[in-house]
Image (cartoon, grey):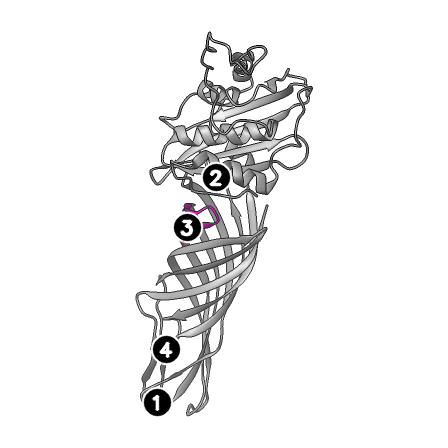
Amino acid sequence: MGWHMTVPRAWLSSAVLALLAMLGLAAPAASQEDSVEPVKLDYSGHAGCPPVAEFLRELGARTDLLRPARADEPARRFEVAIEERGGRSVGRLSVTMQGAPVVREVTAPTCSEVVSALALIAALALDPRSQDEPSKTPAAPSSTPSVASAAPTPPPVAPRLPPVEPFESVLIPDRLAVAAEEEERLSWSIGIGAEVLSGVAPDPTAAARVFGAFAFPARSVGGVFAPELRMSVVRSANTRGVAPDLREAKFAWTSARLELCPARVSIRDDITLRPCAGLSAGALQAAGERGVEAAQSQRRPWLSADVLGRIAWRVAGTFLVEIHGGALIPIVRDEFFFVGPTTTVHEIPPVAGYFGAGAGAQFP
């Protein structure tokens, strides 16, 4: 995983340079005799972002130790994806040679600033001697030689921009495929949790649940349409209900819950919100207890439509925690009562509710 930073305008490049030095992204120092490295580039950006030619201009102005790789040539791959989040531009650079990619992320008010910062990071990965600011064409030397100099020093030659066309030939056809390849894959999760339920028994009751889920990839970078299908099994603790005449009954609720969560809203890179709808089917069992002669037990079917929301936080690696809450709208509503004399101990309300938390693992 990569790290994330918010970049002010004034010291964007200096901060990136310092962080890179600390994190060791840059390759070992190159000598003047180092050969030019073959590179492959994938670039995508949201509406209003500079074209790939601008990224190449920024990159080529900082280092000339690169060239476009041939199609069959082993080369370091640089993948650049920039999207818009909350009115700001968020750019991601993935550098892959062998093994897992190294990912860096930059946030700035404008896409141009993100492009400049990512070009600096890419240049430093290729050449630690890369300049913090793009090179400018040097001024012509003075016609009057210095007294202390035996001969005038020739002006430095500005780095030449690598050709754009060969790079464009390896661009991913879908400009959103860079992030989709790395992040948006089918994932699955399992976990356990606890809930507090109201409405299924006369008093609030605790319940335990186990769940499994499949999450499908978003159709676009930063897209909210990323469906998740989840199955849960919930079992409540035994809860007592007391009628007005002090006779008691015991209630227990068991249910299987199927949820469909069509959307995913990213609150932060590791925190997501999902609105969901579902269906719960199971049984509610009631049995007479204290003060009841010839007590009987009744098991009634439970069927409800569910509306809920869930916030999940991927803490580290595969480990995640979540909180959720929602409403149960019973389709089957029963009334439980004692006879001789007839006294109601519990009636299923039009709307029941629940709130809970859980923990689990998500793969990959």
Of marks 4 and 2, which one's residue comes earlier in the chain? Answer: 2
Query: Any magenta on residue 268?
Result: yes
Give the number of the disc on residue 274: 3
Which sits in the foreground, 187 or 203? 187
Of marks 3 and 4, which one's residue comes earlier in the chain? Answer: 4
- Which span of residues is magenta-colored? 264-277
Position of 189 relative to 95 (above/below): below
Which sits in the foreground, 171 or 151? 151
Question: Label 1 belongs to which residue?
Answer: 340
Distance in Å between CA atoms under marks 3 and 4: 30 Å
Q: What element carries label 2?
A: helix
Distance in Å between CA atoms under marks 4 and 2: 60 Å
Relative image position of residue 18 (x, y in whole percent)? 53, 39
Q: What residue type is labelled 1?
A: Gly
Q: What element carries label 3?
A: strand
| Residue 185 in sight | no
Are the residues flagged by discs 4 and 1 in contact, CB closer than 8 Å? no
Of marks 1 and 3, which one's residue comes earlier in the chain? Answer: 3
Q: Which of marks 2 and 1 is in front?
A: 2
Relative image position of residue 83 (x, y in whole percent)? 42, 34
Question: Label 2 belongs to which residue?
Answer: 15
